[in-house]
Structures are given as C-alpha cells and as structure tokens.
Image: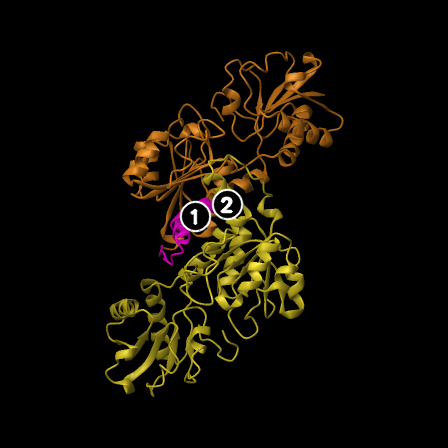
Chain colours: A yellow, B orange
Amino acid sequence: MNVAIYLPSETKTQDWIRMMGELMPDWNFHPLTAVPDPEAIRYAVVWRPTTGCLRPFPNLKAIVSIGAGIDHVLADEDLPDLPIIRTVGTDLTQRMKEYVALHVLRHHRNMPALQASQARSEWAPVVVPPATRRRVGVMGLGNLGAEAAKCLSAIGFDVVGWARSPKTIDGVTTFSGAAGFGDFLDGTEILVNLLPLTDETRGILNNDTFNRLKRGASIINAARGPHLVDDDLLGALASGQIAAATLDVFHVEPLPSDHPFWQHPQITVTPHVASLIDAPTGSRIISRNLRAFEKDGTVADLADARRGY
Amino acid sequence: MNVAIYLPSETKTQDWIRMMGELMPDWNFHPLTAVPDPEAIRYAVVWRPTTGCLRPFPNLKAIVSIGAGIDHVLADEDLPDLPIIRTVGTDLTQRMKEYVALHVLRHHRNMPALQASQARSEWAPVVVPPATRRRVGVMGLGNLGAEAAKCLSAIGFDVVGWARSPKTIDGVTTFSGAAGFGDFLDGTEILVNLLPLTDETRGILNNDTFNRLKRGASIINAARGPHLVDDDLLGALASGQIAAATLDVFHVEPLPSDHPFWQHPQITVTPHVASLIDAPTGSRIISRNLRAFEKDGTVADLADARRGY
C-alpha cells in the first residue's frame, strides 16, 4: 500500500516517513511532493496541506489529518471529496488535559503576579479562594474538552461546559447551543476554548463573549487561532474586563516576531504545544487507523466534513 | 471563655480577633501581648510564638497552631506541656493540592523554558512525554500529602509516595521508613516535599537525596524551609543534577531580599502561599475545634508533641 505524507517542514516529513515505515514495514511512504507513481497512492497523511496538493492522486481512498481538527484540511479549496480520518488518542487527550489544568491553575493562583513579585525580589503573598469557589467554563466537549473538564473537576474547580449539542459529564454542569451560551458564560472566571473551528465558531472569542464573563476573567485558547478576535482581546485586556490570557494557537503560526501578543504583560504565549502530535506518538495512532480503514473501509475517528469536525 | 491570639503581625492579629469574635460571640479574644487578666486565659491561638510567651497564662488548657504543622510552636523552648491542636481542613488541603498540581505541571511541561522563549519573542516548541510517563514522588502522606498524591494520579502522573510509616493510597505506589527511601527516590523526576518538620526530617532535601533522583529532576518544597539544605540545592542546580526548583518556604521568612534564591534563573520563589491559612478560612476551622475541645476535652486534629506532628 502506498501513502503520501505532507507537513510544511521537510525535516518533519522525513521524521514521519521514517516512523511510519518502522511501524508498517509492509507499506510504502513517500513525501507528497516527490511521489514516484501518483496513481499508486491510496492514502495521504497531511498537516496544513497546500491548496490542490491532493489532486494529482486519482486513486486516493482517504485523507488522514495529523490533528484532532480537520479545519486545516478543509482549508484546501480544491480538496477531493473523500473520507477524512482525525488523529485522536489517549496520549493526545492526556497532553491537552495537562495543558488545560496547568494554565487554569496558573490563572487561578495568580502565578503571573507572583512571578512579577519574584522579579523584584519582593515577598508579596496573594490570597486566592480555593478552586471550589472558582468557576471554570470549558467550550467544546468532544474527546479533548470532556477529559479536560473532568480533570478540572477532580482538581476541585466549579466546572461548567458548553457544546453545540447536549452532553452529560459527571461533575460538570453543561449547557448547549446558542440558547445556552449566555448562561454558560455568566459567572465564569476562567474560560477555556477547545471548540473545533467551523463557520459557526470562528471569532467566538470576541467582545460579546468577554463582556458576559465575570470582570477580571482569564481566557485560555488551546483550539485554533481564528476562534479569537485578536483586537477584541487587546481591548478587553486594556479595559480590565479580561485580566489575563494564555494563547497556544494563532491566526498565523509561528506567531510573527513583531506581533503585539509576544511582549504583552497580560498574555502568556505558548508555541502550539498544548497537545503536540509528535511523530512517535502520532505515527502509532495513524498506523492503527490506516490498518483499520484498509481492512473495514471505516474507522472510529472519521470526521464529518459538512459539520466541520 | 477567654482566648489569647498571637501572630507576628499586629494587623493580622487584629483580623483574627475580629473574625473569631464574629464566629464565637460568646467567647472573648485578646491580643496575647495585651491580655487584661492572664489567669482567665484558657486557650492560645498562635503562629510562630516567641519563646516563653505562653508562660504568663497559668490556666491554659490547650494551644492551637495556626497551621497544619506544629514545628513553629515546638520551637518555643519554654513551651508549657499542653495539648496542641493543629489546624487542618478541606479548604487547606484543597489549596495545597492545587499548589502541588500547578507546580508539578509547570516543571513537567517545562513552562520556565517556554516563558524564557516568550521573553525573546521566539517560537520554540518543547516536546515532553505525557504525564503517564513522568514519575512524581511525594514525601509525606498525611492529610496534605495523601490528597496531593491522589490529585496528581487523577491528572495522569506516575505517582510514588513515601512516609515514616506504611500507608495505602489508591493509584499510588508507597514506600516507608529509612529502608524504603532510596527505592522511592530511584527514577523520580519531580520530587514534592510535604513532610512535617522534625529532628528526623530536618535537612532531608540534601545532596544524598538529590543524587538518587533521575538526572535533571525538579524539586518542590511546600513544607518547611529547614527541610532544605540551601547550599546543596545551589550546587545541584549548578551541576545539572537538579534542573529546577519551586520553593514556598525558607529558613528565614520573608526571604531576605539579598538571598540568592530570588534571582536564580532555575528557582521559582513563592511567598509561603501554598496552603495559606487566611483569617476567614482558618477562624472557621479553629472555632469548630475550640468548641469541640471545650465540650469533650479532645479533638480529631490533636498533635503528638513527642513525634513532632
């Protein structure tokens, strides 16, 4: 079986080809940009494919997104109409819940203020309420959001969740749809975004959303850059409506070195590491999914292109 | 009933007198340094009492430590031989487990490196293993240590625990006594100290301990300053045996502004806030304990002065 692999970095493409080859020695992996026989390619494994890059392969059976989201695949306006397999797994869910727990706790315990005091060699205790009296709102309750919400609840936070359709999660009060969004935001002090990026969720982190939160709230965006209206965040930080933000994703990645987020005292920038799919972890998941799809013509983590996730 | 209150800060002493008075309007609370009738005092509620300061009260029935530990009370070399009531409660255990989870996650996810990259506006992803492949060792498995260990296990870490006597905690591999200490340390990458301070545990965070950990380990001390041999830590950070430390407690508090820990790039200093007992939280717990002791002559959280905790 022949597979084409594409990531924007050539070094990473080679890493993936080596790892996938070790796990599936009976399959052949080629860089998508240097395929010897395009008609022989049955699968494409891609991260941020360029427009039209999958057209040269007439016998493709499925596309594999190197990511839990498929927005970066759907961004190809000349995408063949084929099944798209998402990459999700316990390692990736684990990594996301760690990231969310870390950054919720950082804002809850006001670590940025304590670190600023340390920089001045100043002993300045900050009293915060226990997590049981701190409301955290999680937007998006798929694999990643549900596990993150459960973890926050285990730590002791008062957790609420919101998704497009109704969900039930032990220990978490859930809201759904446009009708439930305002109630979800009311009283939330730390807002975590784990939504898929779709036409409905693009720009959802905007002034209307920020103004509904408790004054001085914090924002954590670990989903996609275009969920956030950058200028609305800068304004809300200046006004004090939002006290602090942690951002892992951006409209343009890597975040350009002159972007105002980098040196903003109220913003923590992390370089898209919340749930990093490295080649060793990702290739294990993708090799299982490819074998399952090849055997049965389907797989558990099939995306719905019309829904967008 | 008459109670004397002492904290090193006069403002805080007045806060506690007001809060305790609101919760127990039928009792009388006085600053220990300005008691109208010393013979009428039955209880003393203290944080870091000065040597001999409890001698003027011949009819004391018990001493209340404003803290989970009693080392700061036992440091009074002229202490009357009386029951000592510790201050522990769900709010305090909750706060400690949040602090431990936050700082274990910070070291696990290498946040200090990511923050240094942000300071340089540099996009530099760091790949770390999932928490399931990271061993965290918790020293001390009393109320605080046991809850912290369970929380770390819920987040996904590979958790081991060590205490003086054998303990059983779901999801945590435990070791005990001097015989089990080396095995506990082997393979530990993040070491959390929550031990009581006793003659046996003073200086336990020393070179022998550091050298037994995995190279590049991190240290979190949220117990007492004298658990740590400061110079051993500075040496282990310089050699790379220890990569980073978070310290909440110090030999002298507040930490003197010229202490090398403040500006050390591998040390995070927090100003004794891990499980801060503020007057609103502490006075609720202490009022319940005082009423229970007055009624029954005992209370669940009685310390053992000979054992030291």
Residue visible at 37% across and 30% down? B230
Residue where numbered disc 2 is placed: A111
In this view, A201 is above or below B200: below
Q: Residue furthest right?
A: B26
Residue A170 position, x and y percent, is 58, 58
**Percent x, y of residue A191:** 57, 58
**Badge 2 local density, few (<14 within 10 Å), some, or many (20+)?**
some
Quickly name the residue at label 1: B106
> What residue is at 49 percent from the left and 77 percent from the top?
A304
Q: Are marks 2 and 1 in contact (CB under 8 Å)?
A: yes
Disc nearest the viewer among 2 and 1: 2
Reply above or below: A280 against B207: below
Asked whether residue B126 is drawn in magenta, I would say yes
Same chain check for tags 2 and 1: no
User: Could you tell me which secondary element the residue under label 2 belongs to?
Assistant: helix
Amino acid under disc 1: Arg
